[in-house]
Image (tube, helix red, strand yellow):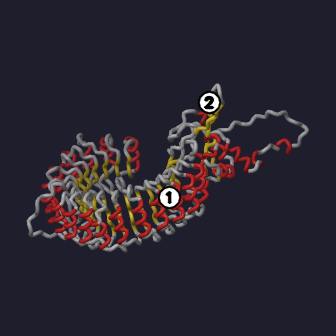
Amino acid sequence: MPALVNYGGDDDFYSGGSYTNSTDLGRLCSISSQVDVYCPPRKRARIGAPFSFGETEVQQNKQPSIDVLPDECLFEIFKRIPGGRERSSCACVSKHWLMLLTSIRKGEYESSKVVKENINSSSDDVEMISSEEDEGYLTRCLEGKKATDMRLAAVAVGTSGHGGLGKLSIRGGSSSCGVTNFGLSAIARGCPSLKVLSLWNVPRIGDEGLSEIAKECHLLEKLDLCQCPLVSSKGLIAIGENCPNLTALSIESCSKIGNEGLQAIGKLCPNLQYISIKDCPLVGDHGVSSLLSSASSVLSKVKLQGLSITDFSLAVIGHYGKSVTNLVLGGLQNVTEKGFWVMGNAQGLQKLVSLMITSCCGVTDVSLEAIGKGCTNLKQMCLRRCCFVSGDGLVAFAKSAGSLECLQLEECNRVTQAGIIGVLSNCGLKSLTLVKCMGIKDISLGAPLSSPCNSLKSLSIRNCPGFGTVSLALVGNLCPQLQQIDLSGLCGITDAGLLPLLQNCEAGLLKVNLSGCLNLTDGIILALMRLHGATLEVLNLDGCRRITDACLVAVADNCVFLSDLDVSRCAITDAGVAALSHADQLNLQVLSFSGCSGVTNKSLTFLKKMGKTLVGLNLLHCNSISAQTVELLMESLWRCDILF
């Protein structure tokens, strides 16, 4: 963690730069090896009093100490400390003083008020005005062993004079001395400007600490709670009652948060725009429906995952979600086909633009078609592990969802080749992604193809083993305007199968990913360069082990705009690197030779020549390149990030 307190002046905002005045340079002192606070340089004390021969040595060394004062007096003294630098210096003295300073609320300091005298001929009025602005500029993140109460106390004291703490993220670990309610309360008292709070894996923070945040930090806008087993609905109710500006709430794996907390948030936070609830066993229909119906006016993004809600909640979403633009539903095992069907037919999701559904058995062909009809502005649809959706259902959905632009299917194993062709023929898709769809088989269709899908620009088919030569040819004939193709993991495709697709891409390909296509050879890459080298910007051939230096020669001769090239684990040698370096028109920015044992120290000169434009170079597992060569490269290519 960076220094918790950095000061360049009482009223100066520290932006992370270095100090220009050497007299202001301080040193960081550690309290119990955990707290870093600013400590100004100290001068050696002068001996100003005359030496008394009549006093004993004990009497001479006995000095009056401020520590003899009771805490009440120290409290009053600390309240009158003029600025943040002085408070930070006091915090360096001891843990005791640090704890006292954290007990003082920001508004209790006398320095937060300035006496402004208006001298008139008739009266001497005194006006109290605020001299410190709590804008919440600073961000602090405490992780693992650094997430302790002492660190939070130092943050509370140290950030008060820098415009105030705006964002705080605490990501705890397995440490037994992790953050407790005490540390969070210190932040609440010292940082009323806090707007964003994220608590992850903090098992010792409960309702008391969260209630203190709610009581003091009325500007809070975003709250993220993950794995907080002691936080219950009581803490969430306190947030609702005291933080009306809350716009985003995320709750995950909080076993004590239930319906009452969500009800309070829905009723008391009128500006709530984003809600995410995941794996909270006490959250049910009552809480979700109350939240959605109360906050329906501005609520635009909703994520509900791993909850025990039923069809009723989805009906409420379909009816009240008039402002919802992004909806994520996952792992809703108690929701049936009826729930999704009602959600679509309720006609309330007219503004929905993006919908993602994962592992929901209630998504069927019937309910999917209803969603397509009810969500008239839906542009992005993602279905993951929805095992009851078939190709027929997709075609019906595509016909009814007239605004659909992007479709992603992952592990939907009832979807067939005919279904994919039907979708492309019946809607204006711009992007299609298929991942691990095992139901697709490489079959020749007897029926003639429909009219071409000129809208499709991006095609991604990853790890679908049944998608082969015939399917590629069908898609190529149907989609002539492709500009991006990703066929990674299609081990079965060959040069002959890929060539028709490349030949039918009339617009010119910009990005091509063929990683893991083991059977491709130099022949298809030469064809790719000949057909699309003039437009190609990104080429990934990672793992294409039959690709040789001839490929790089073709790249050097044909490519003008290529900026990202990956030939990792290919049969590349120094000759190929040399060919690339001699292409004056190339302006490669990212280049990867990972696992290319044929690239040796001889390529040093060639890599230096290309280094004028490179910002990233991957030489991982290049066993023929020595560490000394890499050091020379680092000296020459100082702007380039080199992996070795």
Distance between the Cα atoms at labels 2 and 1?
A: 42 Å
Q: At x 57% / y 52%, what residue is drawn? A: 216
Residue 244 seen in the figure: yes
Residue receiving disc 1 = 240
Residue 407 x %, y %: 25, 61
Element under disc 2: strand
Number of numbered discs on residues: 2
Q: Which mark is residue 26?
A: none
Relative to 29, residue 146 above or below: below
Residue 413 x %, y %: 25, 71
The quadrant where residue 289 appears: bottom left
Residue 503 horizontal side relative to residue 165, left or right: left
Residue 451 horizontal side relative to residue 146, left or right: left
Label whose residue precedes the other's in the sequence (2 or 1)? 2
The quadrant where residue 279 appears: bottom left
Please state which amino acid type lies under the numbered disc 2: Asn
Q: Nearer the viewer, residue 415 or 311?
A: 311
Crowd class of label 1 (few under 14; some 14 to 19; many from 20; radius 10 Å) = many
Element under disc 1: helix
Q: Which mark is residue 118?
A: 2
Residue 237 horizontal side relative to residue 533, left or right: right
Which residue sits furthest right? 54
The quadrant where residue 83 appears: top right
